[in-house]
Amino acid sequence: MYGDLAPWWPLISPPEDYAEEAAFCATVLASAAIPVRKVLELGSGGGHNAFHLKAKFTMTLVDLSADMLQVSRRLNPDCEHLQGDMRTLRLGRRFDAVFVHDAVDYMTSEADLRRAMETALVHCRPGGLALFVPDDTAETFQPTTHHGGHDGPDGRAARYLEWAWDPDPADTWAQAEYAFLLRDADDSVRVVHDTHRWGVFGRHVWLRVLREVGFTAEVVTEQTTEDRTPREVFVGRRGARNPG
Ligand SMILES: C[S@@+](CC[C@H](N)C(=O)[O-])C[C@H]1O[C@@H](n2cnc3c(N)ncnc32)[C@H](O)[C@@H]1O
C-alpha cells in the first residue's frame, strides 16, 4: 500500500478525515511540561495528520516509504521530510514532542515496539513527551470489516474493503486483508490485494515498555464524535533530569 499504491492514499484516507483526531492529538502534545513548538512525527505517511498539526507546530516528518513522503511533500511543502525507520532513526537532534500515529501498528513484536519507543526517547527534549496512537490494544481489538474510498478532483477514484482479524490472540499481531478497486482518469479499473500485519499489545505491555525505556507512562482515552470505539493512546513523558 505504501509503495506503488502511495499516490492513491489521499483517495483511500483523505486529509479531511483526520481533522478531529489531529485536534485531540494536538491537545495531548501541548500538555508537555515545556512549550511544544517542534514536533517529530515518525511514520508520517501521506502527512494527513501533519496537514492539521502544522497549524500549531513545526513538523518534521519521517517515513520509511519514499513514495509516501512524495505524497506528503505535495500536501505539506512547508514541512521538513526525511526518510527513515522509526526503529533505528537517529537524527542527532531533539524535539519538544514526538508523535507516532497509526504507523506504530507496524511494530508487530515487543522488540520492535521497544525500538520505536527508544527512538522517540532519544529525540525528545527533557520535559517533552511522546504520543503513540495505535489503532487497537489487545483489550480493544475486534474483528472488523470496513469499506471506504473517495473520488478525486483529477478523475481518479478508489474503493476498498478492509477485513481484519486476529489469527492467534496469544501472539502480538493481527492480520488485515485489503481489496482495492482503483479507477484511473481514463476509466480503466484494476484490483489490488494487499496483506498487512498489525501489532496488538496489551495496555500493560505499552505502559511497561514505555517505563523500561525511560518515560513516565500513562494511557489516555481519545475524545471523538466519530462512530467507532475511542482509541486508547499512550503518552510517555520525559523527565527533566532523565539521562541520555
Ligand atoms: C497508515 S500510514 C500512516 C498515515 C498517516 N497517519 C497520515 O497521516 O497520512 C502508515 C505509514 O507507516 C509507515 N511505516 C511503516 N513501518 C515504518 C517504520 N518502521 N518506520 C517508519 N515508517 C513506517 C508506512 O510507510 C506508512 O507510510
Image (cartoon, helix red, strand yellow):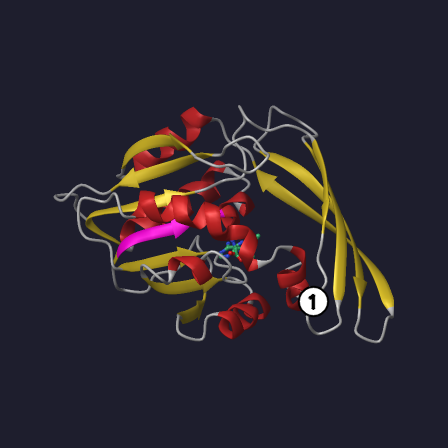
In this rendering, position of residue 176 left or right of residue 95: right
Q: Which residue is drawn at 39% across and 70% down?
A: 79
Q: Which secondary structure is most common in the magenta stretch?
A: strand
Q: Give the range drawn in magenta.
A: 96-101
Residue 224: in magenta span: no
Percent of width and height locating residue 107: 52, 44
Q: Residue at x 55, y 56 (%)?
A: 16
* Quarter of the figure with residue 177: top right
Q: How crowded is mark 1: few (under 14 residues within 10 Å), some or many (20 or more)?
A: some
Residue 97: in magenta span: yes
Q: In this view, does 84 lie above or below 116?
A: below
Q: Mark 1 points at which residue?
A: 152
Looking at the image, which residue sits at the far right? 188
Assign the N terminus to one quadrant of the image. Answer: bottom right
Percent of width and height locating residue 29: 31, 47
Per the image, label 1 sits on a secondary structure element best described as: loop
Q: In this view, does 33 lie above or below 89?
A: above
Q: Which residue is drawn at 42% across and 36% down?
A: 233
Q: Nearer the viewer, residue 159 or 205?
A: 159
Q: Is residue 187 above or below residue 220?
A: below
Q: In this view, does 189 lie above or below 23?
A: below
In this rendering, position of residue 60 left or right of residue 154: left
Percent of width and height locating residue 71: 57, 70
Percent of width and height locating residue 32: 23, 45
**Kind of residue indicated by mark 1:** Gly
* Quarter of the figure with residue 86: bottom left
**Number of marks present in the image shown:** 1
